[in-house]
Image (tube, rainbow, N blue to C red):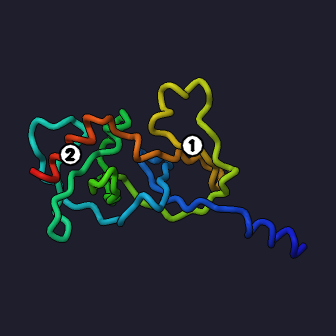
Amino acid sequence: MMQGTEKKEKQYKRQLVNFRINNKDYALDIIKIIEIISFKDVTPIPKLPSFIEGVVELRGLVIPVIDLKKRLGLTLAAGGRPNHILIVKIHGTKIGIIVDEVREVIGVEEGSIQSPPEILKDEVSEYLMGICKFREKLVLILDIENLFTHDEKNVLGEIKKG
């Protein structure tokens, strides 16, 4: 019996930060996240793409903030205020990502992460790294590096400089 336990512990587990949007589970690889902060008011900046909510100040830095619901084309749920902002770094630019709720860090065996179904490949492959099951729920693992187009990354980088 002991051998089976030892084998399981030796399998590689990917550490993911599990969060919720519209009561659905998503995740990002923990190595992509710099920190998680409580939601704070965002200062809007006019004439930006609709998914860019504006900026927040964090320890003297101005950080652009995006609404992940809008970026993914999800409907905005009535009521409910988001609870957290994930601070990530994409190509040298710190960006805040608004999510409804950060749940926990989960360990998922590398082999249990599946590719998106073939029928969805063209629609989501650029930003969906994979899908896994955790506690009987499907979790969509986002690829934050590919969530934005080249032009959108440039806009986000310019906000920081501006």
Secondary structure of residue under mark 2: strand
Q: Residue at x 50, y 25 (%)?
A: 122
Name the residue type under label 1. Answer: Gly
Q: Residues within 10 Å of mark 1 (few under 14, many from 20)?
A: some
| Image location of residue 51, percent across then percent down | 25, 39
| Image location of residue 160, percent across then percent down | 16, 53
Quadrant the N terminus occupies:
bottom right
In the image: residue 61, left or right of residue 150: left
Check the image and report above or below for 151 versus 80.
Answer: above
| Image location of residue 80, percent across then percent down | 31, 51
Distance of label 2 from label 1 (alpha carbons): 27 Å
Check the image and report above or below for 33 versus 59.
Answer: above
Q: Residue at x 59, y 43 (%)?
A: 131
In the image: residue 3, left or right of residue 74: right
> Which residue is farthest right?
1
Q: Residue at x 64, y 61 (%)?
A: 13
Name the residue type under label 2. Answer: Glu
Of residues 6 and 21, the one nearer the viewer is 6
Q: Residue at x 48, y 32 (%)?
A: 124
| Image location of residue 39, percent across then percent down | 27, 61
Check the image and report above or below for 19 versus 105.
Answer: above
> Which residue is farthest bottom?
2
Label ID, residue 154: none
Residue bearing mark 1: 130
Closer to us: mark 2 or mark 1? 1
Residue bearing mark 2: 53
Q: Earlier in the sequence, mark 2 or mark 1?
A: 2
Of residues 63 and 139, the one nearer the viewer is 63
In the image: residue 14, left or right of residue 84: right
